Image: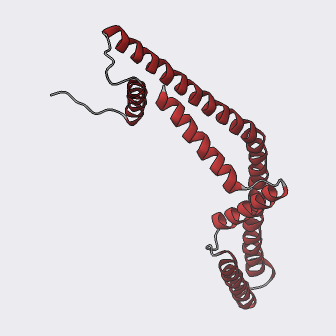
Amino acid sequence: MKDYNVSETKARGNSKLFHNVIERLEKASPDTRYSHDDVSMMLRDAISKQSLTVHKERECLLQQLNLIEEVLGPIEKEMENAKEMSHVKSVRSGLTFVSVIMIQFALSQYGTYIAFSWDIMEPIMACVTLSDAVTGYIFWLWCGKPWDLDSWRRHYYEKELKKRLGSLNINDDEVKNLIETKKQLMKKLTKDD
């Protein structure tokens, strides 16, 4: 059994081809008789018209692709730079977060074992723990993210990236749309080949 599944692109091309042949036959008078050479010539003519149309469509797609690449080139460089700088700032804020926790721990150990005793440090550490909990709760209310190092860094990364892209007048959604359009054009061009 033969498989008669035809891809959509081929079916569309064949449809246009036959449409050109039928259009030419309809223009002729009804009593005209065609020889094998006439039909062959009509098919060659229709194929050449189809080839010309496909070539024009391909050139148009290539021009659109080149235009998108021209626009995206500098924007992607600026975005990469902004992402790198945002990453640096988020790492710095993460180190600040870890440093504060480590300083709290070091001071609690120093106060407990060297300077004072646990009897004096216990209420101080309770206040420090309560302030950490309140700070975490406020961060959660403000950002809607949990109070941990990854959320802290991600928040500052996104905030800094948004600020830098805004200062460069780059809309992230528009860039994503351009990249998606570029992918679709590449898919059309490779599908037609």
Residue situated in front as seen by the camera: 7 or 124:
7
Farthest residue in the top direction? 37
Eyeballing the image, is 85 above or below 48?
A: below
**Rendered residue at 75%/48% (across/down):** 79
Residue situated in front as seen by the camera: 13 or 78:
13
Eyeballing the image, is 77 above or below 152?
A: above
**Rendered residue at 33%/25% (across/down):** 30
Residue situated in front as seen by the camera: 11 or 114:
11
Image mark count: 0
Q: Position of residue 158 (x, y in %)?
A: 71, 61
**Rendered residue at 39%/17% (across/down):** 43
Q: Horizontal placement of 169 versus 182: left or right?
A: right
Q: Horizontal placement of 2 versus 149: left or right?
A: left
Q: Position of residue 103 (x, y in %)?
A: 77, 71
Q: Position of residue 24 (x, y in %)?
A: 42, 24
Farthest residue in the left direction? 1
